Image (cartoon, rainbow, N blue to C red):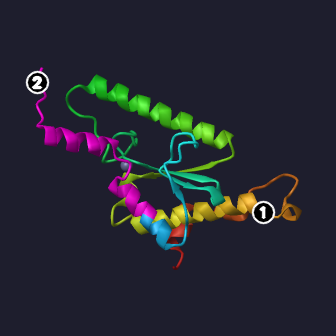
C-alpha cells in the first residue's frame, strides 16, 4: 500500500513523534534554568530516560503528553473515534511502561515528578512550576537533612503535609 503521506509530511510526522524536545518540555526546562536549576536531559542510565534529571535533587521529571501517556480524567485525553481497540491497547502499554519506570526509579532512591501537558497551559503554568519547585526543595531536604535532626520514627517534615491549595494561596 502506498504511503499516503508525502516524504516531507512523513518526516514531519515521524520527527514530531520522535522528538524529545517537545514544546511543553522546553517550557519546563527554561523555567527551571532561569530559576538556577541545573539538569541533564534524557540521561540514558536513568530508567525511563526522564525528560529532565536533577542529580543534586535526585529527582527525575517526566513531561507527559496527555494523550500518549493516557492522562485519566483529562480534557486533552479523548480516545479517537476509530480504531478504539488499537489506541486503547497502545495507551495502556504506555501507561504500564510509565508506571514500571517510576517504580524502578523510586526503588533506586530517585524521586519522580510527573508534569502533564495540560498543567502547562498559560493559565496553569506558573502554579504548576511553583509546585515542581516545592517538590524539588522537599526532595533536597530529604536527601541532605542533617542526621542529628532525623527522628527515630522518620516522620515526614511538616512541609510535606502542606496541601496544594494552601501553597497556591501563598504570596510570591
Ligand atoms: Zn492532561
x then y, percent, for residue 61: 52, 52
Residue 76 at what x, y percent from top left?
30, 47
Q: Report the residue at 26% width, 26% height from top.
A: 84
Q: Does the residue labelled 1 lie within 8 Å of ligand 1?
A: no
Magenta region: which residues?
1-29
* In the displayed structure image, the side of residue 155 where residue 66 appears, left or right: left
Of residues 32 and 164, which is closer to you in this image?
32
Query: Would residue 83 be found to the left or right of residue 119 on screen?
Result: left
Place residue 69 in its image quadrant: top left
Query: Which circle marks residue 99 in the picture?
Result: none
170 to 64, vertically: above or below: below
Query: Given the current orientation, which residue lies at the most extreme bottom position?
Result: 171
In reply to whether residue 20 is colored magenta, the answer given is: yes
Residue at 64 percent of width and 43 percent of height:
106
Q: Is the magenta stretch mostly helix, strand or loop?
A: helix
Please tell me which residue lies in front, 92 or 73. Answer: 92
* Residue 116, percent from left and from top: 42, 51
Mark 2 lies on residue: 2
* Vertical relation: 33 (above or below) 63: below
Task: Please report the residue visible at 55 percent of the width from the left and 37 percent of the height from the top.
Answer: 101
Write down the quadrant of residue 36 in the picture. Answer: bottom right
- Is residue 26 shown in magenta? yes
158 or 118: nearer the viewer: 118
Q: Is residue 160 visible?
A: no
Quarter that holds the N terminus: top left
Q: How crowded is the residue under tag 2: few (<14 C-alpha within 10 Å), some, or many (20+)?
A: few
Q: How many numbered dots are placed on residues in this image? A: 2
Q: How far apart are marks 1 and 2 (CA)?
A: 61 Å
Q: Name the residue under label 1.
A: 145
Kind of element beneath mark 1: loop
Amino acid at each position: 500500500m502506498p504511503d499516503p503521506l508525502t516524504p516531507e509530511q512523513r518526516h514531519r510526522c515521524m520527527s514530531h513523534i520522535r522528538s524529545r524536545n517537545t514544546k511543553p518540555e522546553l517550557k519546563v526546562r527554561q523555567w527551571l534554568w532561569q530559576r538556577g536549576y541545573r539538569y541533564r536531559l534524557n540521561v540514558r542510565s536513568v530508567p525511563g530516560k526522564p525528560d529532565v534529571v536533577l542529580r543534586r535533587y535526585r529527582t527525575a521529571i517526566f513531561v507527559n503528553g496527555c494523550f500518549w501517556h493516557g492522562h485519566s480524567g483529562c480534557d486533552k485525553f479523548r480516545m479517537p473515534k476509530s480504531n478504539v481497540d488499537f489506541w486503547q491497547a497502545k495507551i495502556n502499554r504506555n501507561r504500564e511502561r510509565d508506571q514500571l519506570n517510576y517504580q524502578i526509579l523510586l526503588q533506586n532512591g530517585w524521586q519522580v515528578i510527573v508534569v502533564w501537558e495540560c498543567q502547562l497551559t498559560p493559565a496553569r503554568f506558573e502554579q504548576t512550576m511553583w509546585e515542581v519547585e516545592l517538590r524539588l526543595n522537599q526532595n533536597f531536604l530529604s536527601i541532605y537533612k542533617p542526621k542529628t535532626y532525623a527522628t527515630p520514627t522518620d516522620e515526614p517534615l511538616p512541609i510535606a503535609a502542606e496541601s496544594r491549595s494552601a501553597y497556591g494561596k501563598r504570596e510570591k
